[in-house]
Image (cartoon, helix red, strand yellow):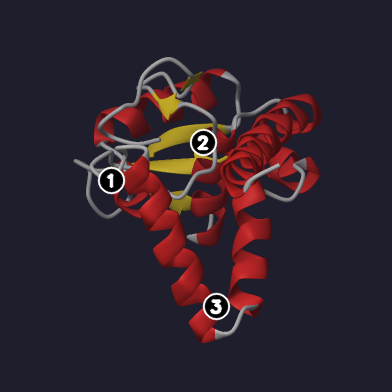
């Protein structure tokens, strides 16, 4: 085998790991990586966050967050509540069901990556980042906006992963 085949195999392994994680997450917790990330951010912010704060932290549009939150509200994982300090503002808050889901969710793939990436020496991090950016450029993907949520498809406003086409808002 040559390096070209080895590199394609490595890329496929990364994609496959992402697919398997999504399946495990859906099976164990009943949520997608994107909705899990919304709940994690709400939890990190003390159990309440504005849609704008969620969109900013995830690097997606507010329309995408609205779709993700709608899905979480429908499944009872979060609720919307009017802010006590600013009546024009709505907060997204975790429910008991959402907290239980967070407890039983497997370790997020991006959290595993972050943990291992941060263990690398500074020069190794820089080299890996450069290589990943180069791969993105080779795949003509440098201009696709992406959030730090490892998922196999783009996030649409319904919060579902769509495998077909890249979404300019997030992936």
Q: SS for tag 2? A: helix
- Toward the top, the furthest residue is 164
Q: Which mark is residue 142?
A: 1
What is the spatial separation of the Cα atoms under label 1 and label 3, in whole angstroms?
21 Å
According to the image, label 2 marks what residue?
34
- Toward the left, the furthest residue is 88
Q: Earlier in the sequence, mark 2 or mark 1?
A: 2
The vertical placement of 107 against 122, above or below, is: above
* Circle 2 crowding by C-alpha within 10 Å: few under 14, some 14–19, many from 20: many
Q: Is residue 148 visible?
A: yes
Q: Nearer the viewer, residue 56 or 81?
A: 56
**Quadrant of the rendered image containing residue 131:** bottom left
* Circle 3 crowding by C-alpha within 10 Å: few under 14, some 14–19, many from 20: few
Q: SS for tag 1? A: loop
Q: Residue drawn 74% across and 32% down? A: 29
Q: Which of the image's four quarters has the C terminus?
A: top left
- Left or right: 89 in relation to 112: left
Instruction: From the top left corner, tell me how far across and down residue 3 is, in percent.
Output: 60, 49
Q: Nearer the viewer, residue 120 or 27?
A: 120
Q: Is residue 50 visible?
A: no
Q: Nearer the viewer, residue 33 or 162?
A: 162
Instruction: From the top left corner, tell me how far across and down residue 83 is, in percent.
Output: 32, 47
What is the spatial separation of the Cα atoms under label 2 and label 1, in whole angstroms?
21 Å
Tell whether label 3 touches label 2 (CB within 8 Å): no
């Amino acid at each position: 085998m040559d390096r070209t085949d080895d590199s394609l195999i490595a890329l496929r392994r990364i994609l496959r790991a992402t697919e398997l994680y999504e399946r495990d997450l859906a099976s164990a917790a009943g949520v997608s990586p994107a909705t899990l990330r919304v709940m994690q951010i709400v939890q990190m912010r003390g159990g309440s966050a504005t849609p704008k704060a969620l969109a900013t932290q995830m690097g997606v549009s507010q329309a995408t967050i609205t779709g993700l939150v709608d899905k979480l509200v429908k499944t009872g994982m979060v609720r919307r509540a009017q802010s006590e300090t600013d009546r024009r503002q709505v907060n997204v808050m975790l429910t008991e069901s959402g907290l239980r889901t967070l407890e039983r969710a497997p370790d997020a793939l991006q959290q595993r990556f972050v943990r291992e990436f941060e263990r690398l020496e500074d020069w190794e991090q820089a080299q890996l980042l450069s290589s990943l950016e180069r791969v993105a450029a080779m795949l003509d993907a440098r201009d696709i906006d992406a959030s730090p949520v490892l998922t196999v498809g783009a996030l649409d406003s319904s919060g579902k992963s769509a495998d077909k086409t890249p979404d300019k808002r997030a992936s």
